[in-house]
Amino acid sequence: MIRTLTALSLAALTALPLGAVELVMVEQPGCIYCQRWDEEIAPAYPKTAEGAFAPLRRVDISAVEDSVTPQRAVIFTPTFLLVEDDVELGRLEGYPGAEFFWPMLDTLLHDKTDFEDPTE
């Protein structure tokens, strides 16, 4: 039993490396643009280089400051916060559609982190 708990604990500790970059989606109930993002982007996101580099974490707008340290208040949903150690590195406000979301996210990742897309 001790070996199993140790293996589970080790797996939990290594799930995200210390200093891991995450994409935090700030959302709220009834947000139609959050729903559009869920339909158009969410299924593919974890399967992309961006999703592997910056896994998605969802946070309700009422709990943002309990979860991360934003550079300024989050007013709109969805807002996508690029964070490291729960501190905001940059953000995308709103959801402009799939054709704009991916290039905007790539720019944010390239500007604020050491992200390299292996398909480029």
Image (spheres, grey):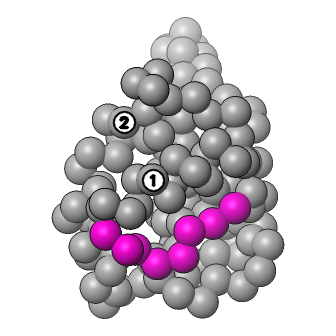
- Magenta stretch holds residue 81: no
Q: Nearer the viewer, mark 2 or mark 1?
A: 1
> Is 34 situated above or below 40?
below
Tell me which corner region of the image, top left, top right, bottom left or bottom right, holds residue 69. bottom right
Q: Residue at x 64, y 42 (%)?
A: 110
Using the numbered discs, state the Cα–Cα distance from disc 2 to disc 1 in whole angstroms: 13 Å
Magenta residues span: 90-97
**The residue under label 2 is which amino acid type?**
Thr
Q: Which mark is residue 103?
A: 1
x and y percent of residue 90 in the render?
69, 61
Q: Furthest residue to the left?
A: 39
x and y percent of residue 61 in the render?
55, 82
Q: Residue at x 64, y 75 (%)?
A: 64
Mark with earlier residue (2, 1): 2
Q: Quadrant of the image for the C terminus?
A: top left
The answer to whether residue 60 is visible is no
Q: Residue at x 34, y 86 (%)?
A: 31
Q: Badge 2, how many Cα within 10 Å: few under 14, some, many 20+?
A: few
- Position of 32 with respect to 116 (left or right) is left
Question: Which residue has dot 2 on it?
Answer: 48
**The residue under label 1 is which amino acid type?**
Pro
> Is 62 situated above or below 5?
below
Say which of 120 and 94 sits in front. 120
Q: Please tell me how many numbered marks the rendered image carries.
A: 2
Q: Badge 1, how many Cα within 10 Å: few under 14, some, many 20+?
A: few
Element type where label 1 sits in the image:
helix
The answer to whether residue 81 is visible is yes
x and y percent of residue 87 in the render?
77, 58
